[in-house]
Image (cartoon, helix red, strand yellow):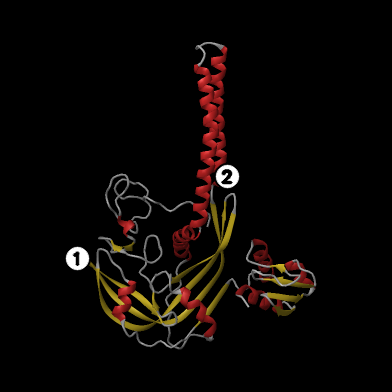
């Protein structure tokens, strides 16, 4: 049973329906009246959730209409959830090796100071996004944040979430445990606006590339057609003396072809314009023990203490954060001021005055000339 099929079966049963699993990847549902109305199904129906449908079944998937149907049943239930996990948390055997794989600094060094057991609080935020152009793409994407260290959980969540169902959910924290505080709402919103856009751009890259290829192909065809008309008009105009009526008509025809080309080119670009919207769906809070690694970061004469967590369920060290873009894992550089860790591009020179500066220290504009950062975050509806 796939995950969507299992979710639908559990939801329908909670609403009083009789549900039986059928092959391949389907459900046979005897639904009460309120469920029939909410989901738009008859009293007895078959639903298919896989590539191959059972006999007589209708397809159910993550398309917009089915997500809306499930949302109509759920209401606000399940939008926020909390798990307290107490898995075994043995000491990390080879800290140096774990750091070698997770920490890549291009202009700074670090020294291991300590490793200790600690508790942390994760926020896992799910978003539904729609990429709309001449075609439509929609899917789910996820952000994970460690509120204790500020790190994004790229690479950790993929290993952690499948193991959640195997762990009992504790009723309360053990006595004496203090979790990192919840961040202010605005801080989370600011992080999401930066982190989500980069990940959405990566997730729709293939779709955007396809749009660009088709736009380029259609622009070429449009140009070739109008260029032939334009050149023919100019050639006919050149065959008669200036001032004659035919010469003026052909010049006007050429100008008309040019105006039509520009108008149709604008229409074509509007057709292929891509708009991406994202909507928050669910937040999962996870409280659990980790192995906390304390590092001393050094850049020239500056020093800074940095913490990273080793997750015992995922058996992975979280990546170094980029404190400007909150982008995915990769090499990091430290600025000379506050020793912010950013991607190397976060220290590049200003495109106008060519003076290098830290985008985490000055996220809005260059401190010298006021120019917005090169490669500023694209506009999107979040």
Query: Between residues 79 and 63, which one lies in front from this camera angle?
Result: 63
Residue at 52 percent across and 35 percent down: it is: 224
Who's the residue at 41% across and 65% down the image? 328
- Residue 197 makes an appearance in the image: yes
Give the answer, above or below, for where 123 lies relative to 380: below
Q: Residue 98 has which mark?
A: none
The local secondary structure at tag 2 comes to helix
Instruction: Residue under label 2, please give it.
Output: 271
**Image marks 2 and 1: residues in contact by CB distance under 8 Å:** no
In percent of width and height, residue 69 lies at: 69, 66
Answer with left or right where residue 65 lies relative to residue 179. Answer: right
Helix, strand or loop status at disc 1: loop
| Other-residue count near label 1 (Cα within 10 Å), few / some / many at <14 / 14–19 / ≥20 | few
Residue 358 in sight here: no
Q: Earlier in the sequence, mark 2 or mark 1?
A: 2
Residue 33 locus on image (x, y percent) = 79, 72
Q: Nearer the viewer, residue 76 or 87?
A: 87
| Left or right of residue 86: residue 54 | right
- The quarter holding residue 281 reads bottom right
Q: In the rendered image, which residue does mark 1 sit on?
A: 301
Tell me the quadrant of the picture where the N terminus can be found.
bottom right
Whether 223 is drawn above or below 145: the answer is above
- Left or right, 219 with respect to 335, comes to right
Residue 350 appears at what percent x and percent y?
31, 49
- Give the image location of residue 373, x and y in percent: 36, 51
Q: Nearer the viewer, residue 233 or 15?
A: 233
Is 239 positioned to the left or the right of 23 in the image? left
Q: Residue at x 56, y 26 (%)?
A: 256
Please, is residue 331 above or below residue 262 in the view? below
The alpha-carbon separation of the residues under discs 2 and 1 comes to 54 Å
Give the number of the mark in front: 2 or 1.
2
Residue drawn 71% across and 72% down? 54
């Amino acid at each position: 049973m796939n995950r969507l099929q299992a979710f639908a079966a559990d939801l329908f049963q909670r609403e009083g329906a009789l549900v039986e699993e059928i092959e391949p990847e389907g459900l046979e549902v005897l639904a009460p009246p309120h469920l029939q109305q909410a989901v738009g199904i008859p009293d007895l129906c078959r639903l298919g959730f896989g590539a191959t449908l059972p006999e007589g079944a209708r397809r159910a998937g993550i398309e917009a209409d089915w997500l809306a149907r499930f949302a109509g049943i759920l209401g606000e239930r399940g939008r926020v959830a909390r798990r307290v996990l107490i898995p075994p948390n043995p000491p990390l055997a080879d800290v140096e090796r774990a750091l070698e794989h997770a920490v890549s600094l291009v202009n700074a060094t670090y020294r291991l100071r300590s490793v200790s057991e600690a508790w942390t609080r994760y926020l896992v935020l799910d978003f539904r996004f729609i990429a709309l152009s001449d075609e439509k793409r929609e899917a789910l994407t996820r952000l994970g944040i460690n509120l204790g260290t500020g790190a994004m959980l790229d690479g950790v969540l993929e290993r952690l979430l499948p193991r959640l169902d195997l762990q009992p959910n504790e009723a309360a924290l053990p006595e004496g445990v203090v979790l990192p505080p919840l961040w202010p709402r605005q801080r989370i919103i600011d992080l999401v606006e930066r982190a989500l856009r980069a990940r959405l751009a990566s997730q729709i890259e293939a779709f955007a590339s396809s749009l660009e290829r088709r736009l380029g192909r259609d622009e070429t065809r449009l140009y070739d057609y109008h260029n032939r008309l334009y050149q023919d008009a100019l050639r006919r105009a050149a065959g008669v003396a200036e001032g004659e009526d035919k010469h003026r008509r052909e010049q006007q025809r050429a100008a008309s072809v040019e105006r039509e080309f520009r108008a149709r080119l604008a229409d074509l670009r509007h057709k292929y314009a891509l708009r991406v919207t994202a909507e928050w769906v669910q937040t999962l809070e996870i409280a659990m023990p980790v192995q906390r690694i304390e590092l001393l970061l050094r850049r020239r004469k500056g020093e800074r203490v940095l913490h990273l967590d080793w997750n015992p369920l995922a058996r992975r060290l979280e990546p170094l954060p980029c404190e400007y873009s909150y982008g995915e894992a990769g090499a990091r550089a430290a600025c000379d001021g506050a020793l912010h860790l950013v991607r190397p591009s976060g220290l590049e020179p200003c495109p106008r005055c060519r003076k290098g500066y830290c985008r985490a220290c000055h996220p809005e504009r260059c401190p010298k000339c006021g120019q917005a950062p090169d490669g500023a975050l694209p506009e999107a509806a979040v």
